[in-house]
Image (tube, grey):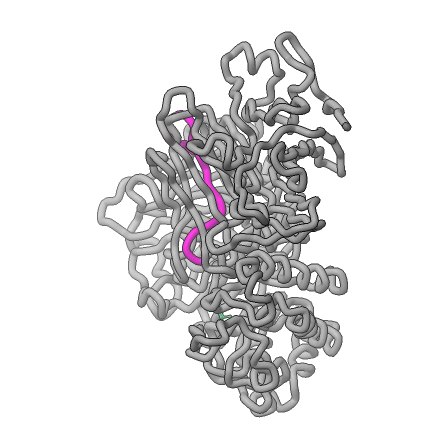
C-alpha cells in the first residue's frame, strides 16, 4: 500500500489524514481517500485549507467516482459488465499515489472493486502550478484473464455546490459553428454530446461554462469552465435534481453510446482528460485561464508566432493551375504575405481532382493541372520571401480513385449494406483501426515531406463524419470498440507523424470547425475555425470559439467583399479587422482587389505583423458581446502579460440612423499607467480616428471607457474602400495602446 500526502497539504484543525488537497495558484481541489472506504469528492473552488472549507460549510461528501451497483438510483460514472454478466461494482480506495511532472502534480487514487478482483480503476486528479487548471481522468484495468465490457467509463465527476447554475455551451453546424448559448441549467439531466464519430464538434463542442450563483457574468461571479481533451465522441451530463442537499453533478468523458468497450484480460484503457478551471471573477477570467493553459501546455507551438497566409480555396476552388497559383503567390507576396497554401484540387493522376467526386486517396500531383509539379511553386514562394503549404485529406478515399480500386476493404462500412457516402456522393472514411490503413495515412504525410522537405505547412482536412460505423477490420465481437479504437488509432498516426516531423505546421480543418477540440492540439498548431468567411458571421463564430480556444489557434481569413454564403457585401477594412483578431490570412484572388483595396490590404497586413505578438499571445478581455444587449456592437481587447501593450477591436455591425454612441470600458490594463492610443490601419492612410494620439490613464480607460464617434456616424467621414459599397454598415476600428513610460 502506498499512501503519501501531497506536498503542500496543510492539515489544519478539522482535517483528517485522508484529506488530500491539490492546488493551483488560485484554486484548490479536495478529496478524501481512506483505504478500504469509498473515495469522496469534497471541494473545488478558491484556494483554501481544509479547515476553512470545513468551517464554512463548503465541504461536500459525494462519491467521487460512483459506480452502478451500489446506489443504482444515483447517477453513475462507471458501468462494467463482467464476462458472466454481473454488472454491479463497489469501489473502495486501495492506494493513493502522488507524482510531479514539470508544472503538473498528479494525485492518483486506485479504486478496487470489492466484488470483482479483476477490475481496478485509477482516478487521476492533476493540478498545474503555473495556471489555474486542474485535470481529471481515469484508467480502467482488467487484471483478470477473461474480457470485461466497459459500458460507461467517464473521465470526470464533479459535484458542484449550487442548485442555481447558468450554463454556457456552443452549438452550430457547418458555416455556423460555435454559437454561444447561455441558459439556466435545466432541471433534470442535461446532456451535451457528440455521436458523429470523427468530426466531433460539428454540432456542438466538448466545452462548457457554469455560473454558480444564478448568473454567468463576464467580470464577476464564480464560474467553472471545462473542456474534454478527446478526438472522439464525447458525453457530458449535468444532473440538476433540485433535491435538497444533493449537489449539481457534472460528469464528462467518452460517449458510451454504441461504444461498449471490450477490455481483454491484462489490458487497460486510459480515458481522456477533462480540463477544468475555476474563476471567481467571471467567465472572462475562466477563458483567460484556459487560454494560458492551452498556449503553455496543450497547443503545439502555442507560444510561437503564426504567419499571415493566403489560401487558394475561396479564390479558385478546385481550379488549380500553374498560372493561377503563380499569380496568387506573386500578388500575395506584393501585399506582404508570408505564406501561400495550395488547397484542394492539385492531385490525382488517373482521376484528376476537379470536384468533390473523385481522387481522394491518390496523393500524387495531377499532371493535367500542374504539369511541372509543385516544385516550381515552392521555389516561387521562397523566391518571393514566403513559405509554402499544401492541402490533404488523408483519412479519406473516393470510390473513384486508384486507392479504392486497390483496397476496397480499407473503408468503414458494413459488408452487407450499401454504405452511406459523404461529399460528392462517393466519399468514404478509411478504417483507421486497420494497421495497413494507419501506415497509408502516415505515408501520405511522410511521402509528401520526404519528397518536398521544404513544405512548411499542411492543411489536414476531414470532410466526412463516421456515417458507417462498422469496421471491416475489427471482428464482429469488437465492433462496438470502433469509435474508441478509431480515435486511438488516429492519435497513434499523429504521434508517428510528429515523432518524425515535429516542426511542420499542420492546420486541422474539418469543413471548417468540425474538429475544434484540444485532443487534436498537441499535433496541430491551428484550426480552420469555419468555412464561413462572411466577416459579420465570423464575429459570432470567433467570439463563441474564443470562450475556450485562444486566438492563435483560430485561423481567420479575409474573404471577398461579396460572401457567397450569406450574399452580403462587406467592406475590406471590417473584413481585415475581424480576421485580425485571430491568426490573419486571406482567402481570395488578390488580383481581383482594386487599387484602393490593395493599398489597404498591404497596410493592414503590415500593421497586423506589428500587433501580432499582442493579438496572438495577449490575454483576451471581452468588452461588448455580439450575443447580448442590442447586438449592434462588438468589442474585445488583448493585453500583454506585463500590461504594457494592448490592442482593442471595436466593430459596429448594422447602421441605424441616429445611433447612440457606445461607451467601451476597457479591461486588464494597469490603472496607474498612462497609455498612448494609436489607430491601427485607419481606413484612409494618415486620417485616423479622433482618439488617435491621446494619452490616457489605464484607470480612466477602464472606469470611464472610450467613445469612438466615427463608429456610429453615417457616411460622412470617408467612403468605404472598394468598388463594392456596403453603405454605412460594418464599420470597425482597431486601437493600439502602448504604455508611456
Ligand atoms: C473544406 C474546407 O473547410 C475548405 O476550406 C476547403 O479546404 C475545402 N474543404 C476543400 O475541399
The quarter in which the N terminus is drawn is: top right
Q: Is residue 169 above or below residue 5?
A: below
Q: Is residue 140 above or below residue 309?
A: above
Q: Is residue 465 above or below residue 293?
A: below
Left or right placement of residue 172 versus residue 367 in this view: left
The quadrant where residue 726 appears? bottom left
Left or right placement of residue 289 versus residue 713 in this view: right
Q: Residue furthest front?
A: 84
Asked whether residue 79 is drawn in magenta, I would say no
Is residue 27 something one can see in this rendering? no
Asked whether residue 203 is drawn in magenta, I would say yes
Q: Is residue 473 above or below residue 72?
A: below
Which residue sits at x=50%, y=60%? 197
Give residue 273's position: percent from left, percent from top.
60, 43
Query: As rendered, which of 421 and 386 lies closer to the eye?
Result: 421
Which residue sits at x=54%, y=62%? 479
Left or right placement of residue 69 versus residue 246 in this view: right
Task: Please report the bounds of the magenta region as a residue range.
Answer: 202-218
Query: As rendered, which of 337 and 48 lies closer to the eye?
Result: 48
Give residue 551's position: percent from left, percent from top.
54, 50
Is residue 731 something one can see in this rendering? yes
Which residue sits at x=71%, y=33%? 105
Which residue sits at x=50%, y=50%? 256
Which is the main secondary structure of the residues drawn in magenta? loop
Give residue 375's position: percent from left, percent from top.
69, 82
Left or right placement of residue 634 versus residue 85 in this view: left
The quarter in which the C terminus is drawn is: top right
The quadrant where residue 369 appears? bottom right
Number of marks present in the image shown = 0
Amino acid at each position: 500500500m502506498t499512501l503519501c500526502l501531497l506536498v503542500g497539504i496543510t492539515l489544519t484543525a478539522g482535517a483528517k489524514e485522508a484529506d488530500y488537497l491539490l492546488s493551483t495558484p488560485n484554486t484548490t481541489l479536495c478529496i478524501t481517500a481512506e483505504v478500504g472506504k469509498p473515495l469522496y469528492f469534497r471541494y473545488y473552488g478558491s484556494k483554501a485549507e481544509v479547515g476553512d472549507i470545513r468551517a464554512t460549510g463548503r465541504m461536500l461528501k459525494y462519491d467521487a467516482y460512483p459506480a452502478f451497483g451500489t446506489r443504482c438510483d444515483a447517477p453513475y460514472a462507471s458501468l462494467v459488465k463482467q464476462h458472466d454478466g454481473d454488472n454491479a461494482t463497489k469501489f473502495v480506495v486501495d492506494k493513493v499515489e502522488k507524482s510531479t511532472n514539470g508544472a503538473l502534480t498528479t494525485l492518483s487514487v486506485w479504486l478496487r472493486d470489492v466484488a470483482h478482483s479483476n477490475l481496478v480503476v485509477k482516478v487521476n486528479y492533476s493540478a498545474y502550478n503555473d495556471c489555474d487548471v486542474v485535470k481529471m481522468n481515469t484508467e480502467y484495468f482488467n487484471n483478470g484473464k477473461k474480457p470485461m465490457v466497459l459500458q460507461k467509463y467517464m473521465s470526470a465527476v464533479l459535484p458542484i455546490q449550487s442548485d442555481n447554475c447558468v450554463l454556457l455551451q456552443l452549438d452550430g453546424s457547418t458555416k455556423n459553428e460555435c454559437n454561444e448559448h447561455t441558459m439556466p441549467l435545466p432541471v433534470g439531466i442535461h446532456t451535451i454530446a457528440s455521436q458523429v464519430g470523427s468530426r466531433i464538434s460539428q454540432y456542438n463542442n466538448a466545452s462548457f461554462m457554469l455560473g454558480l450563483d444564478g448568473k454567468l457574468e463576464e467580470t464577476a461571479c464564480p464560474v467553472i469552465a471545462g473542456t474534454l481533451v478527446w478526438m472522439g465522441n464525447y458525453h457530458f451530463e449535468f444532473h440538476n435534481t433540485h433535491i435538497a442537499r444533493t449537489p449539481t453533478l457534472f460528469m464528462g468523458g467518452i460517449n458510451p453510446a454504441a461504444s461498449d468497450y471490450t477490455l481483454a484480460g491484462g489490458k487497460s484503457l486510459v480515458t481522456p482528460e477533462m480540463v477544468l478551471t475555476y474563476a471567481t471573477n467571471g467567465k472572462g477570467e475562466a477563458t483567460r485561464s484556459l487560454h494560458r493553459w492551452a498556449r503553455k501546455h496543450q497547443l503545439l507551438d502555442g507560444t510561437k508566432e503564426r504567419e499571415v497566409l493566403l489560401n487558394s480555396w475561396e479564390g479558385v476552388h478546385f481550379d488549380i493551375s500553374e498560372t493561377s497559383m503563380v499569380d496568387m503567390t506573386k500578388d500575395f507576396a506584393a501585399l506582404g504575405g508570408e505564406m501561400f497554401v495550395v488547397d484542394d484540387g492539385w492531385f490525382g493522376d488517373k482521376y484528376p481532382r476537379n470536384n468533390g467526386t473523385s481522387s481522394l486517396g491518390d496523393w500524387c500531383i495531377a499532371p493535367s493541372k500542374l504539369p511541372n509539379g509543385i516544385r516550381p511553386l515552392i521555389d516561387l514562394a521562397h523566391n518571393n520571401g514566403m513559405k509554402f503549404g499544401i492541402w490533404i485529406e488523408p483519412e479519406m478515399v473516393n470510390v473513384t480513385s486508384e486507392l479504392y480500386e486497390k483496397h476496397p476493404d480499407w473503408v468503414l462500412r458494413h459488408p452487407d449494406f450499401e454504405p452511406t457516402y459523404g461529399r460528392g456522393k462517393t466519399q468514404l472514411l478509411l478504417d483507421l483501426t486497420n494497421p495497413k490503413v494507419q501506415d497509408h495515412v502516415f505515408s501520405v504525410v511522410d511521402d509528401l515531406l520526404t519528397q518536398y522537405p521544404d513544405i512548411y505547412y499542411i492543411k489536414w482536412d476531414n470532410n466526412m463524419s463516421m456515417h458507417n460505423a462498422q469496421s471491416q477490420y475489427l471482428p464482429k465481437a469488437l465492433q462496438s470498440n470502433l469509435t474508441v479504437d478509431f480515435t486511438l488509432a488516429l492519435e497513434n498516426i499523429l504521434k508517428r507523424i510528429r515523432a518524425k516531423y515535429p516542426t511542420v505546421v499542420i492546420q486541422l480543418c474539418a469543413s471548417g470547425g468540425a474538429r475544434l477540440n484540444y485532443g487534436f492540439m498537441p499535433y496541430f498548431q491551428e484550426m480552420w475555425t469555419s468555412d464561413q468567411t462572411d466577416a459579420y458571421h465570423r464575429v459570432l463564430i470567433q467570439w463563441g470559439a474564443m470562450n475556450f480556444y485562444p486566438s492563435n489557434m483560430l485561423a481567420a481569413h479575409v474573404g471577398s467583399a461579396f460572401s457567397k454564403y450569406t450574399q452580403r457585401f462587406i467592406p475590406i477594412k471590417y473584413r481585415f479587422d475581424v480576421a485580425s483578431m485571430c491568426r490573419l490570412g486571406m482567402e481570395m484572388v488578390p488580383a481581383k482587389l482594386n487599387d484602393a483595396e490593395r493599398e489597404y490590404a498591404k497596410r493592414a497586413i503590415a500593421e497586423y505583423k506589428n500587433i501580432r505578438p499582442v493579438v496572438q499571445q495577449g490575454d483576451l478581455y471581452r468588452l461588448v458581446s455580439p450575443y447580448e444587449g442590442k447586438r449592434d456592437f462588438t468589442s474585445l481587447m488583448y493585453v500583454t502579460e506585463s500590461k504594457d501593450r494592448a490592442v482593442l477591436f471595436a466593430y459596429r455591425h448594422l447602421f441605424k440612423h441616429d445611433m447612440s454612441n457606445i461607451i467601451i470600458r476597457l479591461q486588464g490594463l494597469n490603472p496607474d499607467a498612462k497609455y498612448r492610443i494609436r489607430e491601427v490601419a485607419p481606413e484612409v492612410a494618415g486620417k485616423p480616428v479622433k482618439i488617435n494620439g491621446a494619452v490616457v490613464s489605464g484607470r480612466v480607460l477602464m472606469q470611464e471607457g472610450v467613445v469612438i464617434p466615427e463608429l456610429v456616424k453615417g457616411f460622412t467621414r470617408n467612403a468605404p474602400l472598394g468598388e463594392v459599397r456596403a453603405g454605412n454598415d460594418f464599420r470597425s476600428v482597431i486601437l493600439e495602446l502602448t504604455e508611456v513610460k
